[in-house]
Image (cartoon, rainbow, N blue to C red):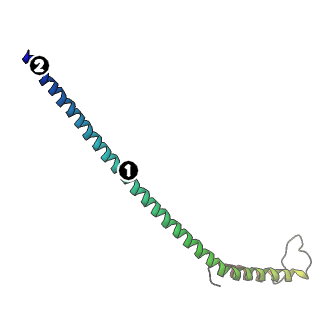
Amino acid sequence: MKSIYRYAGVALAAIGLVTLGAIAVRHYGNGRFEDGRNAVLADDARAAVQRQTDRDALDRYSALATGTLTTALGTQLPAIQGQTHDTLETIRTVYRDRPAADVACARPDGVQTALNAAVERANQAAHGQL
């Protein structure tokens, strides 16, 4: 009888060791899974920070470019408008005392010269040479 109890005790101890081993392996596997998951989350967080940094830099450069363009237009646009309005007044003056153009649309004297001068000034203004 004592031997049956002894075998039962050994069997229970073996079952206990196997159970503890299985628990230890599962705990180790879960720990490794969590380590890998945490590493992936950390990589994702670093990538998100980098993307946000890139976005902030792009926003700063965009604002700088917009400011530069606004400043350039603020200084060049009045000169361009002055030249444009001058040309309109010249054309209006040329046609003021003339009859309406006939079917052939012939230009009166001086119109082509004024138009050529306006084109030249517009080209110079477009290249910032005013």
Farthest residue toward the front?
2
Identify residue type, mark 2. Tyr
Q: Residue at the spot x=65%, y=77% of the render?
A: 73
- Percent across and percent down for residue 45 are 40, 55
**Alpha-carbon distance for marks 1 and 2?**
53 Å
Answer above or below: position of 16 versus 95.
Answer: above
**Callout 1 touching callout 2 (CB < 8 Å):** no
Answer above or below: position of 97 versus 67.
Answer: below
Indicate the quadrant containing the C terminus: top left, top right, bottom left or bottom right.
bottom right
Q: Disc 1 on helix, strand or loop?
A: helix
Q: Disc 2 on helix, strand or loop?
A: helix
Residue 41's label in the rendered image is 1
- Quadrant for residue 18, please give it: top left
Residue where numbered disc 2 is placed: 5
- Percent across and percent down for residue 80 are 70, 80
Q: Residue at the spot x=52%, y=69% of the render?
A: 60
